Image (spheres, grey):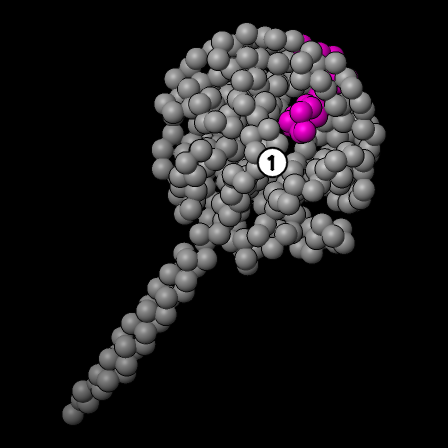
Amino acid sequence: MRSVPFRRPRLVHRASVLMMAGAALAVLSAGAARAERLAFVLNSADATISEFDIDTHQEVRRVSVLREPHHTAPTPDGKYLLVGDTAGNMLFFLDAVTGERLKQIPLADPYQLQFSPDGRFFTIAGLARNQVDIYDGSDYHLLHRLHVDAMPSHMNYAPDSSVVYVSLQDTGKVTAIETATGNVLWTSDVGSTPAGVLWHNGQVLVGVMGTNYVAVLDPADGHIARKIEMAPGPHNLFVSPDQKHLYVTCRASGVIERLDWDTLNVVQSYHVAGGPDDIVFAPDGKMWATLRWRQHVAIIDPTSGEIVDTIRTGRSPHGIWLNTNQPLLHLSMADRPAMP
């Protein structure tokens, strides 16, 4: 007589599966909650965006774009993070909280991009096409297109949004453009391969990569009022959250320089191998720096200079943004820096 198989193990197995599924959903829900504190890293050579949990330093997801993303710009209302895919001629809109890719619009060569402080203008430096485009900041229709020589790279605005200052890498110049009209106000020679631009205390600072200095320009006519000496290859400039220091990434020499806010003297140097490029500051005060040539982000204690962690990214990580960072609304318009 054949025996009938005992069925209870199958019931126990199903119950176990349901319990495991419930636990997995709980883990995913917790992960989704944590993921609201996100670091966005643009992997230029991989055509992807890595999104990291700021607290755990774990990659939450990797979002695909088209060809070559480089820089970001949060919208003035804080709803979206814009990502420019320069070779793909596309502007992507990501949910600034969840990191989800929501929509896209075609725009020519969105290499460097930034809203004016008042939100009225949205300017793109088209490095490959040698053009600067000024758009309406509300609906992105083109207001002015300027053909420039050559390689417009980085930019920053006057605090009242009336002028945008753009570095022209291949010509060693910086140009000042009136945003309302698109007229060029002046063009100034600053030295070999200028890059990052920052408005600071009534002056325009420019990282001049082919030299060992940051040029301090008079915004009225662009003449160089001072040269701040530092490690070779100063690339981009950033403001500390407490507005007590400026930071300059010297990509070619693997150094980040810390400058006093008032004197602009170098007060501390951080040696960070791998081509430090863009930096942001996390809520815990740590500095996150993309390492363009090392496929990592370095997390640095700005007080001690210690690299406390490194996170693997995609190839050629460039732009970086944290959705925990807030606009500097408490500063007066005269002192408020337009963030790069």
Does residue 144 appear left or right of residue 212 in this picture? left
Q: Nearer the viewer, residue 155 or 69?
A: 155
Residue indicated by mark 1: 318
The image shows residue 16 at horizontal and vertical percentages of 32, 76
The image shows residue 231 at horizontal and vertical percentages of 82, 34
* Magenta stretch encompasses residue 201: yes
Q: Nearer the viewer, residue 55 or 138?
A: 138
What residue is at 48 percent from the left and 27 percent from the top? 118
Height in image: 302 above or below 141?
Answer: below
The image shows residue 185 at horizontal and vertical percentages of 61, 8
Where the N terminus falls, by quadrant?
bottom left
Name the outermost residue toward the left. Answer: 1
Mark 1 residue type: His
Where the C terminus falls, by quadrant?
top right
The range drawn in magenta is 187-206
Does residue 157 appear left or right of residue 9 in this picture? right
